[in-house]
Amino acid sequence: MSFINKLASFTSILGLVAIVAGLFNRMPNILKWMDRWGDYTSWLIKIGLVAGGGLMWFVTRPRGLDEDDDSELKNY
């Protein structure tokens, strides 16, 4: 797993933790900076973390060779 892939996973998990913790009014101190911007902006930040991390993970995920893809075999 590459560094960017791990960073993307961490970002998405951080956003999910912030959303769930906010729903129970148990926001960790390190994530309280999001709430200082107001409700609307904090939700945008949290959703952006989840969506941005998910998109980065999707782009950087390891890909295997498809069974139907014989393009590498045609070169021989």
Image (cartoon, rainbow, N blue to C red):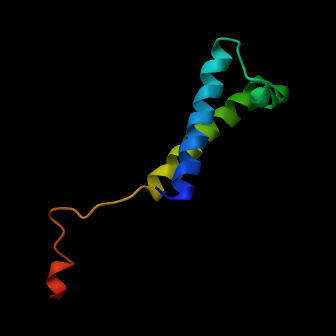
- Image: 32 above or below 53: above
Q: Is residue 70 above or below residue 57?
A: below
Quadrant into which the C terminus falls: bottom left
3 or 37, which lies in front? 3
Q: How many marks on residues?
A: 0
Task: Report which quarter residue 31 is drawn in.
Answer: top right
- Res 69 visible: yes
Q: Quadrant of residue 10?
A: top right
Residue 34 visible in the snapshot: no
Q: Residue 67 location, x and y as percent?
A: 15, 62
Looking at the image, residue 23 sits to the left or right of residue 73; the answer is right
Can you give x and y, in whole percent of width and height, for residue 43 in the image?
A: 68, 29
Residue 54 relative to residue 41: left or right: left
Of residues 74 and 38, the one nearer the viewer is 74
Q: Residue at x 45, y 51 (%)?
A: 58
- Please report the residue visible at 54 percent of the width from the left and 50 percent of the height from the top: 6
- x, y percent for residue 11: 61, 42
Q: Does residue 17 appear to the left or right of 58 in the view shown?
A: right
The quadrant where residue 3 appears: bottom right
Q: Nearer the viewer, residue 68 or 40?
A: 68
Q: Residue at x 53, y 44 (%)?
A: 9
52 vs 19: above or below: below
